[in-house]
Amino acid sequence: MRPVIATTAAAHQPNLLVTVISPIMALVVRFAFQFTTSIVSFLSLKMVPAGSNEVLQAIHAVDFVTLLYTAAGLSLAPAGYDLLKNLVTIFGRLEQKYPLLTGNV
């Protein structure tokens, strides 16, 4: 991350300090946010009584480490989907910035 000063054209307008991050860092931050949100939601299912629900019985574990591994494995799917969605957005914007040589598709 590097701060960049955006100067304004008018004489009495303040300059803006903008922090620019790379697309890779943005992808890492978004993946970590989605993974953390998902793992917390799966860990909170431990507070719900399992009853006869097979899904909740599979998520409930004897110890915390097993529960954490199960929740982490289940959290990879939504985080991976969000990563693919963000990659499509980034490549779509790059395609708009650098169109194909054959013209618009």
Image (cartoon, rainbow, N blue to C red):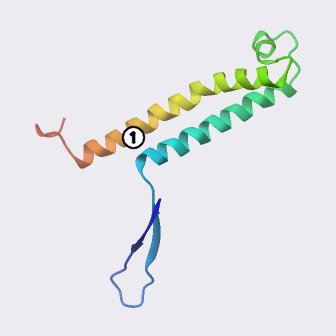
Residue beneath the point at 67% across and 33% down = 38
Is residue 48 rendered to the left or right of residue 34?
Answer: right
Is residue 21 rendered to the left or right of residue 98?
Answer: right
Picture quadrant where residue 35 is located: top right
Dot 1, how many residues are within 10 Å of its Cα: few (below 14), some (14-19), or many (20+)? few
Relative to 89, is 54 above or below? above
Relative to 14, is 16 above or below? above
The secondary structure type at the circle numbered 1 is: helix
Indicate the quadrant containing the C terminus: top left, top right, bottom left or bottom right: top left
Is residue 105 rendered to the left or right of residue 21?
Answer: left
Residue beneath the point at 41% across and 47% down = 23
The amino acid marked with disc number 1 is Thr
Picture quadrant where residue 78 is located: top right
Q: Position of residue 86 (x, y in %)?
A: 45, 38
Residue at the extreme front = 65
Residue beneath the point at 43% across and 80% down = 15
